């Protein structure tokens, strides 16, 4: 099992002999591989030792990531403005602090790949290429929204771009991702499903059932756990008795990996390595990305369960700030260039929001539409003759 | 007498329950430090400590199961399921375990378990956080299903439920948490019986949960038009006390049944069937049902308004019935 941690002190808690090497690209990242762990569990768990590719990301790639991460942040900030104006309803769960994950992961996906999402799904949608105006329209319950106003913030889907839907049920998307992966394998494609879910969701029965099933069926799915330290008021330290959610992979005989989810370069690289394997048909992977939810659980959360100091200190590790530092320090990008990109993204987001504000509301009669689909016509019964 | 909200009344009942019996404990997602996603359990952790008031991981099946198993060993758990929609992730523990064990084992065990949960639409929570699923539960023999419509009943029914030695699902409508009424400070219990919330001689409106206030509103309008409506709050889906309803219908000869749940196979069908079985000769008109359409709860305000039954829809049904 591979474990990548940002803080070297965490490594002390890991079982086995650890090999530590300095990573040239992402400052302060320690790569460790745990050989003893490999021996403890079945040989099939770690089929081969994946070489960590040290290919440097180009400046253009990183700038592109920066753009998308800012787009997500601007979207969430605007969503909160809409909530303040009472233009949205019920909970808005923002993705602030986790942008590197959606962006770094979705950057690898190709046509025909799918993702499943959670209640905190705006970032996944945007990273997968969803239309901002239709997203805002959905948040405001408009007819032009992705779900014609029937879904809301927590339920955005766009099958045309491979986004199988956000989900209001914690853990609800994990079995669905498994089913989608089965379909991709059944159809003999080399496509994959990326299943996003939280640390909290990893305690649902659905997580355990789906991982096992995906493992025995060797399905092309990457179970991507965004461990943001909190599940509403429940701290990760109280909800599980292990250091890394990825350790659970061992129970299902699949590969497990933990990476720093606030380092876009690492997210991109490690996910890319996993993806390559999964595309080749080696079966599912449980990839944990450690991050931190910088905003409340939802807009309006009193956050009585954590201290302001904790949030302030974790803000220093904000993935956008870290990418900024990387671009400025290692790639010679000027701060003004970055500021310009951020404001371009913000302007684009505001334009989408303003357009969506003018969109029409659904009509009461629409209540009755969309419940059942038409029958399948493309079938002719063939008599079955026993041989 | 002081007026408090249903949320405060439930919080008070929980304090009384924990204070009255060392066997009582409460657990669920975010109930301790956070005070509950439903905001009903604030203060409990401070007053009764982390042994008896604790947060669980997001594992509804294990949450209900913790209740079932510990109840078998004579604890009196009050477990919280933050939304009734999450029945989906723990139904086996309710349907095949809690509801079956005593009977299946020939009366060998008691299951003094209360599952508190939240139902209802109207606040834009969407299809997976707004349902009214009481009829599904009411269909299962072996569990009790309580569904209060105000703060007074909520406190009295919750304490009654904690004293019950059988599994109880206690359903709180999210739109009622802030509604206030007179609630005595001292402990008291309400029975698993219907409560006549308003008397009248012309028509019987049988309802429960958030629709009670809508029915009362309709009754006020009817009064101005010279029609006296009797509003019956059934309060308990299971057991279902029929006598109050039958007596009322024998008096009025007309009945309208109203609930927020979808119409098809809703509990209103059971109420209507009971009325026609037991008061057929008294009925001057067919029993009419007011309920939500048979679709999931939509998000947009216009759609959700169209979905929700309300006092106007009850009024219209009453008028049709009295024509
Ligand atoms: C089955 C189910 N249980 C509980 C909830 C209530 N709930 C919504 S989000 C959440 C926390 C989820 O935590 P995590 O999976 O870590 O995701 P995060 O919010 O941190 O992104 C909970 C308990 C739910 N929506 N569905
Ligand atoms: Mg979390």
Image (cartoon, rainbow, N blue to C red):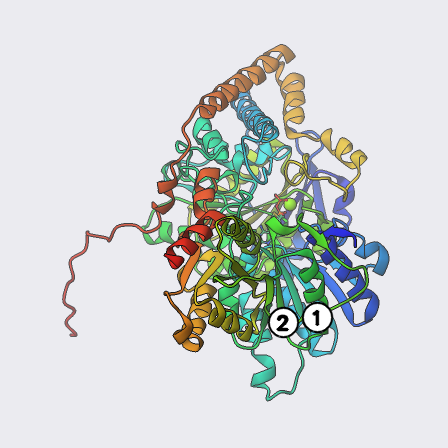
Kindly tell me whether mark 1's CB lies below 8 Å from ligand 1.
no
State the residue lying farthest toward the bottom: B106
* First-in-chain label (2 vs 1): 1
Q: Which residue sits at x=67%, y=24%?
A: A321
The circle drawn on residue B192 is 2
Q: Position of residue A328 (x, y in %)?
A: 65, 17
Count of marks placed on residues: 2
Q: Which residue sits at x=56%, y=51%?
A: A170
Report the Cα–Cα distance between label 2 and label 1. Answer: 8 Å
In the image, is residue A150 above or below residue B285? above
Q: Report crowding for label 2: few under 14, some 14 to 19, many 20 or more residues within 10 A (C-alpha).
A: many
Q: Say which residue label 1 marks.
A: B160
State the residue lying farthest toward the front: B226
Whether the residues at callouts 2 and 1 have beta carbons within 8 Å, the answer is yes
Q: Position of residue A10 (x, y in %)?
A: 76, 45
* Chain to which mark 2 belongs: B
In the image, is residue A57 above or below residue A101? above
- Quarter placement of the C terminus of chain B: bottom left
């Amino acid at each position: 099992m591979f474990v990548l941690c940002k803080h070297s002190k965490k490594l002390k808690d890991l079982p086995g002999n650890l090999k530590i090497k300095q990573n040239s690209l992402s400052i302060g990242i320690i790569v460790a591989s745990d050989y003893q762990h490999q021996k403890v569990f079945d040989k099939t768990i770690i089929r081969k030792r994946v070489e960590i590719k040290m290919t440097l990301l180009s400046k253009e790639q990183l700038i592109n990531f920066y753009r998308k991460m800012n787009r997500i942040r601007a979207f969430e900030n605007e969503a909160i403005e809409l909530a303040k104006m009472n233009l949205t309803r019920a909970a808005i769960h923002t993705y602030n602090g986790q942008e590197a994950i959606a962006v770094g992961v979705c950057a690898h996906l190709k046509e025909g790949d799918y993702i499943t999402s959670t209640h905190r799904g705006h970032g996944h949608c945007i990273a997968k290429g969803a239309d901002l105006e239709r997203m805002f329209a959905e948040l405001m319950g408009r007819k032009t929204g992705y779900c014609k106003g029937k879904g809301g913030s927590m339920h955005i889907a766009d099958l045309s771009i491979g986004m199988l839907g956000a989900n209001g049920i914690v853990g609800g998307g994990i079995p669905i991702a498994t089913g989608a992966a089965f379909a991709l394998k059944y159809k003999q494609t080399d496509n994959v499903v990326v299943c996003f879910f939280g640390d909290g969701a990893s305690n649902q029965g659905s997580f355990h059932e789906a991982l096992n099933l995906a493992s025995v069926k060797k399905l092309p799915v990457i179970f991507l756990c965004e461990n943001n330290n909190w599940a509403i008021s429940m701290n990760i330290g109280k909800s599980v008795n292990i250091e890394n959610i990825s350790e659970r992979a061992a129970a299902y005989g699949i590969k497990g990996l933990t990476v720093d989810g606030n380092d876009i370069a690492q997210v991109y690289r490690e996910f890319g390595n996993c993806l390559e394997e999964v595309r080749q048909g080696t079966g599912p992977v449980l990839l944990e990305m450690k991050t931190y939810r910088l905003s409340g659980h939802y807009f309006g959360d009193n956050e009585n369960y954590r201290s302001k100091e904790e949030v302030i200190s974790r803000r220093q590790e904000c993935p956008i700030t870290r990418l900024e530092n990387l671009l400025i320090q290692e790639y010679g990008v000027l701060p003004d260039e970055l500021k310009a990109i951020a404001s371009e993204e913000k302007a684009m987001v505001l334009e989408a929001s303003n357009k969506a504000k003018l969109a029409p509301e659904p009509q009461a009669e629409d209540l009755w539409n969309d419940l059942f689909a038409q029958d399948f016509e493309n079938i002719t019964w063939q008599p079955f003759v026993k041989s | 007498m002081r007026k408090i909200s249903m949320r405060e009344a439930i919080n008070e009942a929980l304090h009384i329950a924990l204070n009255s019996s060392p066997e009582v404990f409460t657990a669920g997602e975010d109930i301790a430090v956070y005070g509950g996603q439903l905001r009903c359990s604030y203060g409990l952790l401070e007053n009764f400590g982390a042994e008896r008031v604790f947060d669980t991981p997001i594992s509804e099946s294990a949450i209900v199961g913790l209740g079932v198993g510990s109840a078998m060993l004579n604890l009196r758990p009050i477990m919280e399921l933050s939304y009734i929609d999450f029945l989906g992730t723990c139904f086996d523990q309710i349907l095949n375990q809690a509801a079956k064990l005593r009977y299946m084992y020939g009366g060998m065990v008691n299951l003094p378990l209360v599952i508190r949960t939240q139902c209802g639409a109207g606040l834009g929570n969407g299809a997976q956080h707004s349902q009214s699923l009481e009829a599904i539960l009411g269909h299962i023999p072996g569990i009790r299903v309580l569904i209060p419509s105000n703060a007074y009943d909520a406190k009295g029914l919750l304490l009654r439920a904690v004293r019950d030695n059988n599994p109880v699902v206690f359903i709180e409508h999210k739109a009622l948490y802030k509604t206030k009424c007179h609630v005595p400070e001292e402990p008291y219990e309400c029975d698993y019986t219907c409560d006549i919330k308003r008397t009248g001689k012309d028509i019987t409106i049988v309802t429960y949960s958030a629709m009670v206030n809508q029915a009362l509103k309709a009754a006020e309008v009817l009064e101005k038009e010279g029609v006296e409506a009797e509003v019956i709050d059934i309060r308990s889906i299971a057991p279902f006390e029929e006598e109050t309803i039958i007596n009322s219908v024998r008096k009025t000869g007309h009945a309208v049944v109203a609930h927020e749940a979808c119409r098809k196979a809703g509990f209103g069908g059971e109420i209507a069937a009971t009325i026609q079985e037991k008061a057929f000769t008294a009925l001057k008109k067919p029993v009419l049902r007011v309920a939500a359409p048979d679709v999931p709860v939509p998000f947009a305000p216009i759609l959700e308004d169209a979905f929700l039954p309300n006092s106007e829809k009850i009024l219209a049904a009453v008028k049709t019935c009295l024509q």
